[in-house]
Amino acid sequence: MSKLTNALLSSLFVAVVGFTQAPVALAASDCEAKAVSADGKPLAGAAKAASIKKCEGAAKSGPSDCEAKALSKDGKPLSGAAKAASIKKCEADASGKK
């Protein structure tokens, strides 16, 4: 019975460790897959590293709906300080702070 229990516990441990590391590996490979130039060719060297770093940073912070909502009254995208202020206000409203 002891061998059966040990085998069960060790396989459970291996499964838990495998599942906890899968999302990290998936995110890294996803960013590598997205590291392509405008003409669809894979990037290499510093350009690839920069693309992957940017992708991983975006994945950690998540998409921002506030950037999409940063529009002027006539529907044109804001820029500069106006855009920053709009995003800051939107994020504060989203988190419940006023």
Image (cartoon, grey):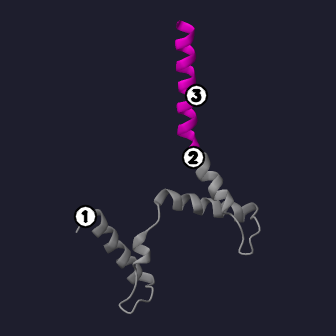
Instruction: Kindly identify the amino acid type of the residue bearing the numbered disc 2.
Output: Val
As measured in the structure, the alpha-carbon distance from the residue carrying label 1 to the one carrying label 3 is 41 Å
The residue under the point 52% across, 62% down is 58
Is 93 situated left or right of 62 in this image? left
Q: Residues within 10 Å of mark 1 (few under 14, many from 20)?
A: few
- Identify the residue at the far top of this view: 1
Instruction: Kindly identify the amino acid type of the residue bearing the numbered disc 3.
Output: Val
- Give the camera-side residue of 6 and 47: 6
Give the residue pinned by disc 1.
Answer: 96
- Which comes sooner in the sequence, label 1 or label 2? 2
Q: Which residues are magenta?
A: 1-23
Residue 12, given in percent of the width and then of the height, sits at 53, 25
Tag 1 and tag 2, C-beta contact below 8 Å: no
User: Image quadrant of residue 84?
Assistant: bottom left
Tag 1 and tag 3, C-beta contact below 8 Å: no
- Which comes sooner in the sequence, label 1 or label 3? 3
Is 18 situated left or right of 80 in this image? right
Residue 15 colored magenta?
yes
Residue 81, given in percent of the width and then of the height, sits at 40, 82
As measured in the structure, the alpha-carbon distance from the residue carrying label 1 to the one carrying label 2 is 30 Å
The residue under the point 44% across, 68% down is 64
Give the residue pinned by disc 2.
Answer: 24
Instruction: Kindly identify the amino acid type of the residue bearing the numbered disc 1.
Output: Gly
Q: Is residue 9 above or below residue 95?
A: above
Assign the C terminus to one quadrant of the image.
Answer: bottom left
Q: Which mark is residue 39?
A: none
Q: Please, what secondary structure does the residue beneath circle 3 have?
A: helix
Give the residue pinned by disc 3.
Answer: 14
